[in-house]
Amino acid sequence: MYNESSIRNQLIVSKTYNNLTQDILHPIETKSGKLWWIAFIIAIIATLLGIACIIYTIITGIGVWGLNRTINWAWDITNFVWWIGIGHAGTLISAVLLLFRQKWRLSINRSAEAMTIFAVIQAGLFPIIHMGRPWDAYWVFPIPNQLGTLWPNFNSPLLWDVFAISTYFSVSLIFWFIGLIPDFAMIRDHTKNPIKKKIYGILSFGWSGKAKHWYMFEEISLILAGLCTPLVFSVHTIVSFDFATSIIKGWHSTIFPPYFVAGAIFSGFAMVQTILGVARKVLHLESYITIKHIENMNIIIMVTGGIVTLAYISEFIMSWYSGNIFEDFTYLSSGAATGPFSWAFWVLIICNILIPQLLWFKKIRKNFLWSYVISIFINIGMWFERFNIIVLNLSHDYLPSSWTGFLPTFVDIGIFIGTIGLFFVLYLLYARTFPIIAQAELKTILKSNVSK
Amino acid sequence: MNKSKDEFKNQLSSFFNQKISRRDFLKIMGFTTAAVTLSACKGPVIRSIPYVIKPERIIPGIPTYYATTMFDGFDLCSVLIKTREGRPIKIESNMMSKYFNITSARIQASLLSLYDDERLKDPYINNKKVSWNDIDEYVIKRLKYISQNGKKIIILSSSLPSPSTKQLINDFSKVYKNTQLVIYDAFSYSSILDATKEILGIRAIPFYEINKIKLIVSFDADFLGDWSPQNMQKDYATNRKPGINMMRHIQIESNMSLSGANADTRISLKPSEIKKILIEVFHILNGKNSQNKIANNIASEIKNKGSDAVVLADGSKEIYALSLIINLKIKSKALSYKKFLFSKESNNIIFNQFINDLKIGNVGALLLYNVNPVYSFPSILKLENYLKKLDLSISFAMKEDETSKLIKVFAPIPHWLESWGDTHPMTGIYTLIQPTIQSLFNTRQFQNSLIIWKNKIHSINNPANNTNNPANNTNNPANNTNNPADISVGYKYYNNNYINNYYDYLRNFWEKNILSKSNIKSFNIALFNGFIHTNEIHTNKCYYNKNYLNSIINNIDNNIDNFELRLYTKTSIGDGTQANNPWLQELPDPITRISWDNYLTISLKDAQKLGIKNWNTATGAINSNYVDIIVNGLKIINIPIFIQPGQAEGSVGLSLGYGHTKGKVATHSSGINAYLIYKNFNLIHYNVIIKKTEGIHEFASIQLQNTMVGRDDIIAKETDLNTFLNFTKEKWNKEEKITSSKGELPLEKISLWKENDNNTGHHFNISIDLNACIGCGTCVIACNVENNVPVVGKNEIRNSRDMYWLRIDRYYSTKESFKTLHKKNISEPKIYNYLLKPENNPKIRFQPIMCQHCNNAPCETVCPVAATSHGKQGQNMMTYNRCVGTRYCANNCPYKVRRFNWFNYVENKKFDFHMNNDLGKMVLNPDVVIRTRGVMEKCSMCIQMTQETILKAKKENRIIKDGEFNTACSKACPTGAIYFGDINDDKSEIKQQLKNNRTYKLLDFLGTRPNVTYQVKIRNLNK
């Protein structure tokens, strides 16, 4: 069992085991409030819009998007990388912080992991629908076929993506689910509704709280944490290879892997802040998600934000100092800052570099509202980072004769809104049916507090 | 009855009452589901049927070639037609012929007019479908009446350089008195013809042998465009091979023309000043002094070269005449007095007489052949009124046009690919037109109609009337000396009444009159060749009237206010004959790179004065203001305006041939009909008032960045002749090297990749000489035709989604470069203000770009499903079936040559061009697959052509000779700028080309190792 260091301040005060159990059970046992329904209906509408746009795309052709012969990727891959990046915080919180024995993670890891899973689902959608012929998408898997030696191209970073993302998704899902088992069992034991009892009974895999169960639970958690940790770094490294291994200026950059990973964590924590900020208020979790949690996350945001800023600066310097005229209009260059996409350039600089600097002030860092606002700016900024990397670099490439601009169509926007909608549909359903706090684990630190 | 009913009832009830086992249920369910599903499916309808009796020469899969002549009233060329399974699918130049053997974009594209879905498919009278007999009866009755009443029967035709048809019209006029042929070209060559008549004594277009000279000075003559029907491109490029003897080209012009774009020195002046300079030059050459610096410079260059120079001019009769006089004065070697061109016969005087005749009601019948006067004649309103009043109007048009609504009788003619005919385009050359496909529709040749109407005159109505017996008139050709079309004087007359079709007439005519002039004695051999050469030469003496000269040089327009307008024809649309051709409408203009449109071109300074702007939207697409212009009191509203670098200040340009109101494709373009202001066939109009108006025009341009942004030494390289001659390659075509531990190594020595075996078998390379490329776009159309490249329409071009496998980039020069700007201490990002915008009178570089077929191709490594891979023969190959459409390859292509099928372009109502109808699809090359939506496509190095050559040689068990391998572009290039061949063949031309000092590979520092090479452009600035 865990033992929190006695020097550290108590994270959660004035809560007993029973309080915790009841707080977790509350949203599952009671009827949903008006607010939940409004949010849910809005999310469903957004999802339907997204589905309609996707169907329209598949029936008509990718031409309904704003792409052109020069900019062959734009919102599709931007959204893909953005969602993947968001999906990074959950695993980092549960796996890496588990290995580092950061107990404060216990209040947020469940929801962060849920966010990861749901975000990866959104991300996984884009590589499929961005294909010209999505019905042939299974060709990217190495499936034996009648042609014998016809395999996918193992040189292609897109193929690495397929493996990286599917692995990441399955491992994250299992890790998340394993953690849920004792909590499902708790709900099973408390609920009085026979149908719920049955469902949670199935989900809890016959958990009975035996010492052996606990022992195996601890072991498998550690093993999966060990597996997840490299994945946190590998997934975004491989996503960055999509760009770094190409020969397009602004893409072809060796600092992309660490820079992308830092950016992913940066955006992931910002998204955790955004999501939990709402959940904390709506589900009355103030005593579990304390200002200490917010501050800790803000510090991680500052660190990763610093890495990202450093990467931007080195990209800028590299393009300028190299004197390579083909670097003149890459996404971090004076050409980009003054060119047709200068607005996107400055959105990136303001949201990702300037605004997070406010977190240096302890007052702001420890202020719930301020952190929340900053996290939203970071989410926007990180979306633009990917947009700039993809669209700006493609729009001004080697031969000026091919230079073009870009404007999204309503389909581009509709699909993006749709994924946000689907994300929230899943999250809202999760919030009402799943134990949103890893109570079994959290109780371990409650215990240490109580025993003191 | 009752019983049986009950029986069924019983059965039915027992069926439902019996207990069905699970297995039976599944069986029934399974069967019904399968049956219902299957019945819902419809098998594909295959519209091909096998031959019952196979035509002798048609072997499925093997092309058959026919020699013929492309002639559509505007363009003329000796061509070979490639037919597959009986349908023409490609036009190639007939290189056996010495002249008129160079195809242009328009000639290549004219194939598609054959398969135009809007063609008239039957004859009509008053919008009622009728038989040809009805037509004949109707027409002959009226023709006879008209001819007896003394009214004129006018055959209004575009230039008709067909000796047999002229003879036929002559015959026809014997039967129907008062028949007159009036030549009317929408884009008139009359001033050139009149000037030549005045100076050289023959009403023809002079033939310029520009391969014999060293200096060409063109005063506004777009000789690489439509200035002369003579194909000058090839001689021009050949004579400009970099070296001591490279021809120098000076162009003085107001619009930026194709010729100006290729000039070594281009001087931008408005038309009135061009005329002044020309007169000054004339004076200086005659020993007078002049203050004008430009004129002095030009004159001294001409003096230096003497007879090795030639002066070309355009704009008016006087200007043209003066250029001829100068050429006579300097005894230019280029001006041939022995050969003249006859392919243009425009005659404004006779046409104006005809209009007068119309006005006073002298004309009874009007036969319209290859003309569309309601569209192209400036005073449209008046003309319409007169045409309505005619007793008989017959349209020999292929499809409905603007004139059609005023016409009663439609006698639709076949396309030239379905026709017989002959032409006499220049001294010493006669060509034949033969059908390469059975008539697709119920059409009849114009000539056939004339023959039938001529011969049938007596079988209709009153056969007793013998006075009009043509036999009586055959011996009396003198009757018709007033007929301007009567060039048949001198041909043998013979009784040809027994001939009742044009083929027999033509053959007879050739055997009697034409073949005797050459050493080819058989009509069939002439037909096989498509042409005959004769030894005819002209022996006219050159003379000109001194008074005439004085009238020219004293007629200087002074103090001209407002703008001067110069009308011109575009490379793609020409005079507008083929405006309904989607290939041509979509072909971007070589200079402006705008497709589907015409516009008023204006200089930046004038635009700023008038507050006119061109700007880019977020997608990069170009928008413009509209202007109204007033020319000679005539106002045209809402003309889109385009700021053209190099346009002379004070001048504007507008192209003819747009603004049709008929034709699906032609109206898809939103152009302006400039014929409205083509008054008196004047190309130049003074005192033009321009006013900015409301509204925004949306252009469809395929190139949005016009300069190389300081990359001039890397992308399309250029140097001047002196540097080229006097310095080593290091200075002007520096090879990229990589610094390594072993010192500086060439790019080939360093690679991360395993080397391919490129030394065995065939390995194809393309070499493109930027010095020879004039940017005419012929290769682009040839590529479209050969590879079934779809047409995407104006909106998609505007969205930068063109599908061109081969494009010709056009770059303007900038005034400054990185070097000069750094010296001035201007740094980023201010530097881009100078580098992104072209200079006022920019030099132009053209660069054809297709897939570079990299040996280390960036696209190949990134495809997740290995849909693009490397071929053994050097091609970068695309497997359409395997492509899932991630578009990563296109992103990773540094040359941006990959094209994605954003939509289905075949059988899609939104892309209602030739691929959306069964007739139009007949043009598709059966050797190249049609791509579905969602897959990437690109240049294949015409693998279907190389493979055919290889297999043919293999079957014949022989080694392939150099020159046998070709691509569509290399075959079509009029200047021979594109070489294609096998570099593993040591003796091949391509191998020689690669050794050339000027050779470089595009963006080779990326390590892509392209199989396409370029050769540095050389500008001859040596005075």
Image (cartoon, rainbow, N blue to C red):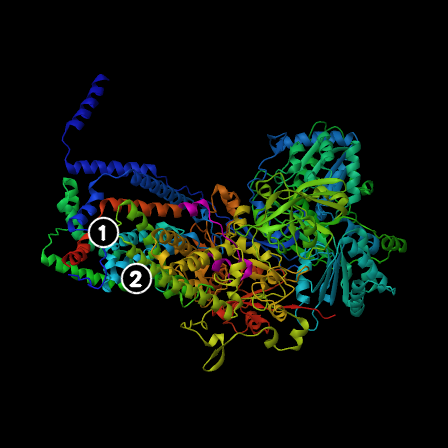
Q: Which residues are magenta?
A: A391-414
Dot 1 corresponds to which residue?
Answer: A437
Task: Judge whether residue B278 can be spotted in this image.
Answer: yes
Asked if residue A410 is among those painted magenta in the image, a careful observer would answer yes
Provide residue B118's location: percent of width, then percent of height: 57, 39
Chain for mark 1? A
Provide residue B932's location: percent of width, then percent of height: 43, 50
Q: Closer to the camera, B352 or A309? A: A309
Quadrant assignment, res B35? top left
Provide residue B827's location: percent of width, then percent of height: 58, 67
Quadrant assignment, res B113? top right
Q: Residues within 10 Å of mark 2 (few under 14, many from 20)?
A: many
Q: Closer to the camera, A243 or B496? A: A243
Dot 2 corresponds to which residue?
Answer: A232
- Residue in view at x 59 percent, y 73 percent: B733
Picture layout, residue A338 above or below residue B621: below
Amino acid type shown at disc 2: Val
